[in-house]
Image: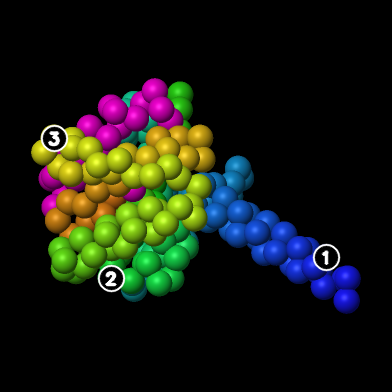
Amino acid sequence: MKMRPLVTAIVLAIVGAMAVWSFWANVLDPHPAGAPSAAAPSSAPPSSAPPAESSPLPPALAGLPLVAELSGEQGLASVEELHGKALGEGFDAAWVGEYESQGRATLWVSRSVREIDAEELLVRMTDRIMEGDSPFSRPVPIEMQGVPAYRLEGMGQVHYYFRSGGYLYWLGIDAPLSEAGLGELVAAAKVVK
């Protein structure tokens, strides 16, 4: 019977390692070196799929160019993974952008059909983070260019999230670029609305 706590500890360690790896592989580094990115041109023949929606991702943030983008089913899967299945309800499209040069930023955007759904998602995210079971500090309400937002820290970066119309934005960015990046993102989000 003394083996049970050891087995439980091993199983929990494996599950924890898998969760960290999944977050890293799907959110923080969705395009490892050498892998084709969603932003790379494709040599595949054109398909009969409907044309892609216009992306709400700015081409650059705080001097960092957009180097990789996920959208469509890949974008939805990545944002659902970030939110968790229960938290991720209420949106119908999502994008993830990686920005990199003399610093790094990642932008997650989800779009809800109704603004109330986006607002409810923002509240659920805030409540979940406030529970304290996340790698982030407690969200601090701020305002940027008249837009209410939240600021928090974790995973080596400053993070902001806010809603603009039916879109919900989450920006993780290196601290020295954080205020400029948020200002540019809010200005871009006001246009997308």
Q: Which residues are magenta?
A: 170-193
Above/below status of 157 relative to 125: above
**Residue 84, image x, y percentages:** 45, 65
Q: What type is the residue that disc 1 sits on?
A: Leu
Q: Residue 59: x percent and y percent?
A: 30, 39
| Residue displayed at 29% across by 28% down | 179
Quadrant of the rendered image containing residue 157? top left
Q: State left or right for residue 67 relative to residue 53.
A: right
Residue contact at pointers 3 and 2, CB within 8 angstroms: no
- In the image, which disc is placed on residue 90? 2
Element type where label 1 sits in the image? helix
- In the rendered view, tell whether residue 182 sits above or below residue 125: above
Is 81 contained in the magenta span? no
On screen, residue 22 versus residue 179, left or right, reads right
Q: Amino acid at mark 2?
A: Gly
Front position among marks 3 and 1 = 1
Residue 55 in sight from this viewpoint:
no
Q: Circle 3 is placed at which residue position?
A: 145
In the rendered image, residue 86, in percent from the top left (x then y), is placed at 40, 72
From mark 3 to mark 2, how far is it between C-alphas? 26 Å
Instruction: Judge the density around disc 1: few (<14), some (14-19), many (≥20) Cα neighbours within 10 Å.
Output: few
Q: Report helix, strand or loop for mark 2.
A: loop
Number of marks: 3
x and y, in percent, of residue 181 in the image: 30, 32
Is tag 3's residue or tag 2's residue first in the polypeptide sequence? 2
- Name the residue beneath numbered marker 1: 6
